[in-house]
Image: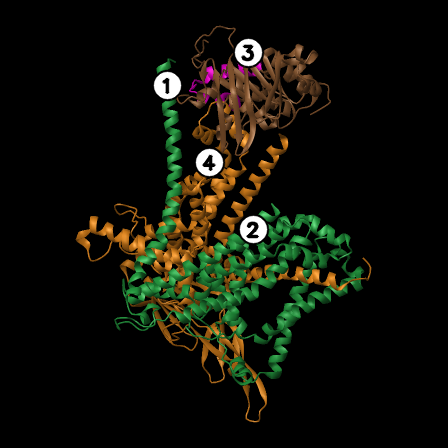
């Protein structure tokens, strides 16, 4: 990484997984949400989590950047390591972790600020002050999210004026602006129409050159179209995980097969 | 709908009557205040009443009342009488007389009748007789005196310091009365005024009401020190209440983790909101004035003791007491704003690696700013209208010194001060100036009412705009 | 940026976060301390009263004999009297109004009504007290018959206009539009009020020999004081009306629609549904509203100062004045010698106000919370 605010990850051999999830169990109050989940997320690929509502996909996703820290009365066992370092370790700075693991949410959630300020928000809080440099980042990220052409003349206008699909791409640009290693996407297309959805999917395929992407989706076709690896979850358990093509053609587990073929879930 | 109707519909209709009655009563009271308060500056015609016994009285009617009597034969009758404002308090100490209509032989509105507004001792109604310059009569008669007065007017300030200028007035029954020009504020002949003159007179009166101190035991003049005192106290209060209110709201909504302490804070806010204002006054007297003030005096002003400096009612203690009173107002408004900021915005910020404070400062606060402003406005309106605690700690009927002036250290936090609400209490409840001070109290009441209503309307408008904004952004997502 | 400067920057950010969190907690602490110190300071001043012999405890007379006897009993009585009369006036009017607003008023009109009520609630009580004491009290004192007639004539006029509208709908076509009937109601109420004034004047001419004071003495055997409980009831009633209205309206509005739809489907009329289904379902909320209004009336100062006449009597008569605890404190405390017995007794009065409003508010809050849980 060459920019001044780039992440300072130690160079790690490329073919090791980015995130190792080991024996994670998780409870909201007394209600168990995850049971003994173990898997790893491969670098520079798209990993998709599929499964019926309430199976724990989103919970697992939110554990990877510790967004669940904000929820009261939770309990967790097991460990999650990123590049070998336990992200729930005592010395971990949560804000730095979240910077390395970006997130895009189910509903587009731009700040009620201008388009420019939305993208500049992350770099600003991480210490980028110079205007020219900031302009550069904003343009690069908007281009990266294939939004630049549409909004270059209205950077100072409120982000709330954009269409839902544009807003979601803006949120991706905003996430990319802090140069994360991993990008978590929590059903990023669930509130979008088919055209906007396909643009986001193209964007994901494009982004995986630089980032590791983890996506939670309801939509099995979407998982089949974009992901390299797929994990199927049911009732808080990880049922099956593997290369997407193999999983969709020859699922090993009966429950996976039922879900994929539409017999259950 | 035909002609069919049931008892039930009539009852619904009747319950609507309850709603309308509430509003009509409030509207009626406001109307009375408005009419009485606004009428004050309008120059009223002077009427000369000639009574059957030959005496003559100059004044204007303020009301008419019937008195019931039973004659010797048991027959009932009603006699009406007029309440006539007379001015000339040297002769009519009450400033008005009752005239039985039966005693009045005739009346007219003489064009030459004038009102002399004095600096002290109220108004005098009469006729211009002569203009006296150092003992020598220089003009005589209405036109001549008027012309002379008007010619001298631009230089009056200078002239009356050099020479003893005075005007001789003759009252309606011919008695002479000399008024020194040093004591004259204004002379006008209401009966000769055109509509335009009256409007100008009205505007000047309203203007001086806002910008001059009261004169003549609150019967005349304005309420500038009360406006100033109220504003100074409210500003002082805001400086205290806003940071604490915002912090407490932040604790309740953002930083506090669920548990007994958060519950205790929540209960404290609710309890504080329910404490009667008079109890805050008593607490302020016991804690701020006697305890804190007494301690300050012992530590910093021992040379003045036993005369208290901070150990008596003053603007600072009033501001602090009202800050406690309005704290829940601010907290509730800011909390409402914080509750309106969608969780997804906070999550977005956290996901980008922002700390809680950074999220708050850069994402939440800009959205909540109008709510904070709403809280400020509402607390200011509340403080401007709250009187009970001030009766105990620090507001006074007449304070010649403003709490902020050109004397070191410029801001005098220990001073007693005048307050609009307290001024209403003082002039309305136990007027030192008698009933003649009531019109002024009406005008002050109107002023306070307008201030409070405008502030509240602004807050309501701001809040509803904010709510629309939220629902808009929520609807788009 | 090197690793070290990055860490330093991170520390500063985390420090700032911590600092603001601590400050916010401090704000919360200040709140708790404030409410505790209000209790503590009052108790600190009044506890010597409890060390003195029992007959001085409630301020029956000054323990050192140097100050005139100050009994709190008539003041406690006066406070209750004022609050009761205020509720007698406010509860029927505002609960009816809330029922109408929540069940029968078009939504758009309700939205314009809310800010009006809010502004009504914001009118300073010194303004209401002033106009009540200086204008309304003397005015009513010279229109007593009209005052007696008003409830009958106003409701009579409202019903009459209603009947007329149904008999001759053509006359009122302008008011057919939903929501416009409110203007018709306005006219009806005004007409009723005017009728009361006119009939009052006729009655005066017929029955009044020498003013109302004599009439009251001769006919009813009581004295009529200009500043009396009825005027307090009306003015303070107006002051607490927005509280009762707002909270009852909220309680009535959250009653699930399915309730009233069930009732209507059984053939009940709108009014039957409102009174038999919706009103009882919102009963707890209305009770809470009345309790909160009661506590406001107890603590209210400026209105009783102006309108109650401030005579410490024990007399339930509607036409006599009284003195309330709050007015006693406000009027006497500025003259009380510091730490004298009067001073302490007045602090005791304030403490009584504090404790009683606190208790009533707490009960009201509990009632409200229960209701909220039921329909949440």
Helix, strand or loop under label 4: helix
Quadrant containing the N terminus of chain B is bottom right
Helix, strand or loop under label 2: helix
Measured in 3D between alpha carbons, the distance from the residue under mark 4 to the one under mark 1, in whole angstroms, is 26 Å
Part of the protein shown in magenta: A117-144
Letter of the chain that mark 4 sits on in the rendering = B
What residue would you read off at disc 1? C7
B451 in magenta: no
Letter of the chain that mark 2 sits on in the rendering = C
Helix, strand or loop under label 1: helix
Q: Nearer the viewer, residue C325 or A146?
A: C325
**Given contact means CB atoms under 8 Å apart, are the residues at marks 4 and 3 in contact?**
no
Letter of the chain that mark 1 sits on in the rendering = C
Q: Which mark is residue A42?
A: 3
Q: Which chain is orange?
A: B
Q: Which mark is residue B438?
A: none
User: Do marks 1 and 3 share a chain?
Assistant: no
Q: Is residue C219 above or below residue C10?
A: below
What residue would you read off at disc 2? C370
């Amino acid at each position: 990484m060459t920019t001044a605010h780039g992440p300072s990850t130690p160079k790690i051999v490329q073919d090791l997984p980015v995130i190792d999830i080991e024996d994670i169990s998780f409870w909201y109050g007394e209600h168990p949400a995850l049971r003994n989940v173990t898997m790893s997320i491969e670098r520079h690929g798209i990993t998709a989590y599929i499964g019926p509502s309430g199976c724990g996909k989103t919970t697992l996703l939110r554990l990877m950047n510790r967004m669940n820290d904000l929820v009261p009365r939770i309990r967790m066992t097991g460990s999650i390591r990123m590049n070998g370092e336990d992200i729930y370790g005592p010395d971990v700075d949560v804000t730095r972790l979240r910077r390395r693991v970006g997130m895009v949410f189910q509903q587009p959630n731009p700040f009620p600020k201008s388009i420019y300020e939305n993208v500049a928000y992350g770099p600003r809080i991480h210490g980028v002050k110079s205007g020219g440099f900031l302009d550069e980042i904003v343009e690069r990220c908007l281009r990266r999210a294939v939004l630049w052409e549409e909004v270059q003349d209205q950077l100072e206008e409120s982000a709330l004026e954009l269409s839902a699909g544009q807003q979601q791409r803006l949120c991706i640009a905003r996430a990319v602006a802090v140069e994360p290693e991993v990008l978590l996407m929590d059903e990023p297309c669930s509130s979008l129409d088919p055209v906007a959805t396909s643009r986001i999917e193209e964007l994901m395929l494009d982004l995986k050159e630089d980032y590791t992407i983890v996506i939670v989706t309801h939509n099995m076709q979407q998982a089949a179209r974009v992901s390299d690896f797929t994990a199927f979850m049911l009732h808080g358990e990880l049922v099956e995980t593997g290369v997407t093509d193999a999983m969709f053609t020859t699922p090993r587990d009966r429950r996976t097969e039922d879900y994929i073929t539409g017999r259950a879930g | 709908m035909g002609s069919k109707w049931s008892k039930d519909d009539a009852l619904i209709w009747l319950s609507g009557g309850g709603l309308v009655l509430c509003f009509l009563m409030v509207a009626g009271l406001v109307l009375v205040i408005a009419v009485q308060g606004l009428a004050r500056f309008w120059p009223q015609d002077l009427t000369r009443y000639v009574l059957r016994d030959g005496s003559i009285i100059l004044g204007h009617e303020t009301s008419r009342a019937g008195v019931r009597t039973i004659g010797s034969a048991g027959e009932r009758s009603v006699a009406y009488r007029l309440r006539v404002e007379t001015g000339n308090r040297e002769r009519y100490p009450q400033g008005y007389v009752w005239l039985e209509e039966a005693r009045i032989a005739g009346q007219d509105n003489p064009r030459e009748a004038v009102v002399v507004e004095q600096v002290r001792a109220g108004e005098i109604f009469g006729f211009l007789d002569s203009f006296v310059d150092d003992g020598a009569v220089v003009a005589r008669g209405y036109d001549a005196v008027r012309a002379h007065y008007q010619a001298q007017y631009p230089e009056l300030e200078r002239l009356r310091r050099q020479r003893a200028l005075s005007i001789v007035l003759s009252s309606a029954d011919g008695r002479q009365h000399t008024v020194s020009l040093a004591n004259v504020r204004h002379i006008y002949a209401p009966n000769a005024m055109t509509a335009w003159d009256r409007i100008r007179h009205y505007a000047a009166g309203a203007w001086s009401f806002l910008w001059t101190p009261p004169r003549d035991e609150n019967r005349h003049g304005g309420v500038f020190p009360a406006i100033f005192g109220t504003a100074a106290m409210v500003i002082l209060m805001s400086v205290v209440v806003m940071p604490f209110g915002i912090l407490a709201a932040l604790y309740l909504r953002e930083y506090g983790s669920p548990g007994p302490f958060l519950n205790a804070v929540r209960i404290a806010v609710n309890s504080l909101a329910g404490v009667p204002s008079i109890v805050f006054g008593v607490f302020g007297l016991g804690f701020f004035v006697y305890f804190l003030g007494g301690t300050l005096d012992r530590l910093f002003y021992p040379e003045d003791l036993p005369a208290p400096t901070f150990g008596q009612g003053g603007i600072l203690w009033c501001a602090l007491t009202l800050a406690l009173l309005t704290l829940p107002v601010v907290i509730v408004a800011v909390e409402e704003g914080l509750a309106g900021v969608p969780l997804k915005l906070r999550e977005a910020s956290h996901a980008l690696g922002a700390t809680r404070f950074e999220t708050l400062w850069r994402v939440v606060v800009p959205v909540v700013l109008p709510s904070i402003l709403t809280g400020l406005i509402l607390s200011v309106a509340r403080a401007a209208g709250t009187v009970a605690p001030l009766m105990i700690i620090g507001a006074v009927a007449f304070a010649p010194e403003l709490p902020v002036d050109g004397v070191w250290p410029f801001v005098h936090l220990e001073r007693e001060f005048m307050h609009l609400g307290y001024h209403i209490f003082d002039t309305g409840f136990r007027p030192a100036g008698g009933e003649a001070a009531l019109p002024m109290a009406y005008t002050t009441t109107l002023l306070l009412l307008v201030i409070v209503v405008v502030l509240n309307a602004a807050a309501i408008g701001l809040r509803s705009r904010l709510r629309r904004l939220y629902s808009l952004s929520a609807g788009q997502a | 940026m090197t690793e070290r400067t990055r860490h330093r920057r991170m520390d500063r950010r985390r420090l700032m976060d911590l600092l603001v969190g601590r400050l916010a907690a401090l704000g919360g602490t200040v709140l708790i301390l404030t409410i505790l110190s209000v209790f503590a300071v009052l108790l600190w001043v009044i506890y010597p009263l409890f060390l003195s012999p029992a007959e001085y405890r409630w301020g029956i007379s000054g323990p050192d004999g140097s100050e005139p006897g100050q009994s709190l009993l008539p003041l406690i009585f006066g406070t209750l009297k004022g609050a009761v009369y205020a509720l007698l006036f406010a509860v029927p009017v505002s609960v009816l109004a809330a029922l109408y607003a929540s069940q029968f008023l078009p939504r758009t009109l309700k939205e314009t009504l809310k800010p009006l009520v809010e502004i009504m609630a914001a009118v300073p009580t010194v303004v209401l007290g002033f106009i009540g004491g200086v204008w309304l009290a003397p005015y009513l004192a010279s229109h007593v018959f009209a005052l007696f007639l008003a409830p009958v004539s106003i409701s009579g006029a409202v019903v009459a206009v209603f009947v007329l509208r149904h008999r001759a709908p053509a006359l009122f076509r302008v008011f057919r539009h939903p929501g416009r009937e409110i203007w018709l109601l306005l006219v009806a109420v005004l007409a009723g009020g005017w009728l009361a004034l006119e009939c009052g004047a006729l009655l005066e001419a017929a029955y009044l020999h020498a003013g109302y004071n004599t009439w009251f003495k001769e006919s009813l055997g009581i004295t009529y004081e200009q500043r009396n409980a009825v005027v307090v009831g009306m003015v303070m009633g107006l002051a607490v009306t927005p509280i009762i209205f707002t909270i009852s309206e909220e309680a009535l509005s959250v009653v699930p629609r399915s309730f009233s739809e069930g009732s209507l489907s059984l053939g009940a009329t709108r009014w039957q549904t409102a009174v038999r289904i919706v009103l009882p379902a919102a009963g707890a909320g209305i009770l809470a509203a009345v309790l909160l209004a009661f506590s406001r009336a107890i603590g209210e100062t400026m209105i009783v100062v102006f309108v109650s006449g401030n005579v410490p009597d024990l007399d339930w008569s509607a036409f006599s004045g009284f003195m309330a605890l709050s007015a006693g404190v406000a009027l006497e405390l500025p003259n009380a010698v510091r730490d004298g017995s009067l001073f302490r007794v007045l602090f005791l009065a304030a403490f009584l106000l504090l404790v009683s409003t606190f208790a009533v508010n707490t009960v009201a809050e509990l009632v409200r919370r229960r209701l909220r849980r039921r329909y949440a």
